[in-house]
């Protein structure tokens, strides 16, 4: 048999192309299934509306977490975040408009997910704690220490005073400022929403009076994953709902 006799009537390049197409189609299908592993079923946003289960939905997979808990995905019986809103229109997928206090409605930039109501842990210890607990950490002398500085809202009104900083001991970075508000309690301010200056801390997301309703933590020295979700959602909601004019078109 001469050289190339087996393949002389076969277009090898075309066969390789077909194999590639089959592989690529399988890859797309696999990624589409994994994309539906979490977030389903989706709430249509209107009473008695159909739930969107997604397609194609993969088989349930169990993830074993570091603390011994198990997480199942997809989980059609999972708890979902609550919200107070109504659809702007009657069709599925219509945007939701907040009902009541828009900063606590849980929609738009203020939406939150029902994460575990436990602190983010590492080796048996909470990762995010105030400096009064993590006494071996501190603020660099080259940076402004915000403790004692006033916190100003977008309207220039004093919202409170910074009393402490909360540090992520694994990432070695500050996550929150702890603020004493006029009502007498303390709330957390995500560091990403704060602009720390030499004589003040400026926050554009909220007005000064709105800091009193920031969701609070159960433990004064720990914050759970669910509490982090709700706190960040409150400030996120302020970027759109803090004042009526923020909901108007930009042009």
Image: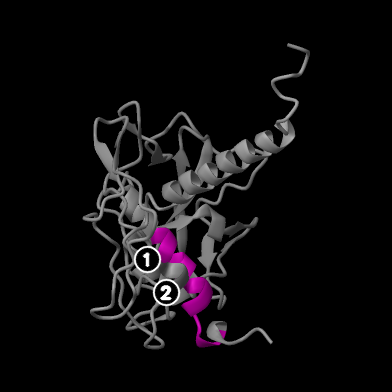
For mark 2, give the secondary structure: helix
Q: Is residue 54 above or below residue 247?
A: above
For mark 1, give the secondary structure: loop
Q: Residue at x 42, y 49 (%)?
A: 33
**Is 235 positioned to the left or the right of 228 in the image?**
right
The colour scheme is one colour
Q: Position of residue 222 (x, y in %)?
A: 32, 44
Q: Is residue 108 above or below residue 176?
A: below
| Frontmost residue, 36 versus 106 | 36
Q: Residue at x 28, y 61 (%)?
A: 80
Q: CA distance from mark 1 to mark 2?
A: 7 Å
Tally of marks: 2
Which stretch appears magenta?
A: 231-245
Neighbour tally class for label 1: few under 14, some 14-19, many 20 plus, Cα within 10 Å: some
Q: Is residue 144 above or below residue 201?
A: above
> Which residue is labeled 1 in the image?
214
Q: Residue at x 77, y 12 (%)?
A: 2
Q: Position of residue 138 (x, y in %)?
A: 52, 36
Q: Main secondary structure of the magenta part?
A: helix
**Is 70 positioned to the left or the right of 144 in the image?**
left
Residue, far top: 1
| Frontmost residue, 55 versus 199 | 55
Residue contact between numbered discs 1 and 2, judged by CB atoms under 8 Å: yes
Q: Position of residue 152 (x, y in %)?
A: 54, 68
Q: Is residue 124 visible?
A: yes
On whether residue 181 falls in the magenta region, the answer is: no
> Which residue is labeled 2 in the image?
210
Residue 74's mark? none
Quadrant in the picture for the N terminus: top right
């Amino acid at each position: 048999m001469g050289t190339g006799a087996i393949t002389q009537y076969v277009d090898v390049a075309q066969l390789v192309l077909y194999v590639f197409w089959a592989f690529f189609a399988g890859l797309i299908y696999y990624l589409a299934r994994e994309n539906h592993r979490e977030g389903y079923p989706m709430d249509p946003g209107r009473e008695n509306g159909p739930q969107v289960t997604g397609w194609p939905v993969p088989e349930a997979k169990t993830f074993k977490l570091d603390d011994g808990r198990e997480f199942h995905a997809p989980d059609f019986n999972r708890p979902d975040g609550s919200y107070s809103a109504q659809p702007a229109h009657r069709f599925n997928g219509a945007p939701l408009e907040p009902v009541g206090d828009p900063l606590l409605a849980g929609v738009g930039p203020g939406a939150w997910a029902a994460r575990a109501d436990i602190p983010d842990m590492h080796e048996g210890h909470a990762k995010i704690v105030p400096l009064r607990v993590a006494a071996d950490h501190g603020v660099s002398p080259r940076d402004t220490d915000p403790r004692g500085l006033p916190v100003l809202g977008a309207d220039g009104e004093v919202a409170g005073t910074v009393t402490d900083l909360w540090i992520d001991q694994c990432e070695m970075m500050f996550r929150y400022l702890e603020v004493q508000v006029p009502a007498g309690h303390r709330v957390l301010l995500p560091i990403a929403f704060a602009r720390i200056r030499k004589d003040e801390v400026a926050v554009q997301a909220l007005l000064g009076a709105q800091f009193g309703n920031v969701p609070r933590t159960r433990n004064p020295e720990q914050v759970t994953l669910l509490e982090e979700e709700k706190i960040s959602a409150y400030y996120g909601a302020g970027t759109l709902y803090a004042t009526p004019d923020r909901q108007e078109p930009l042009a």
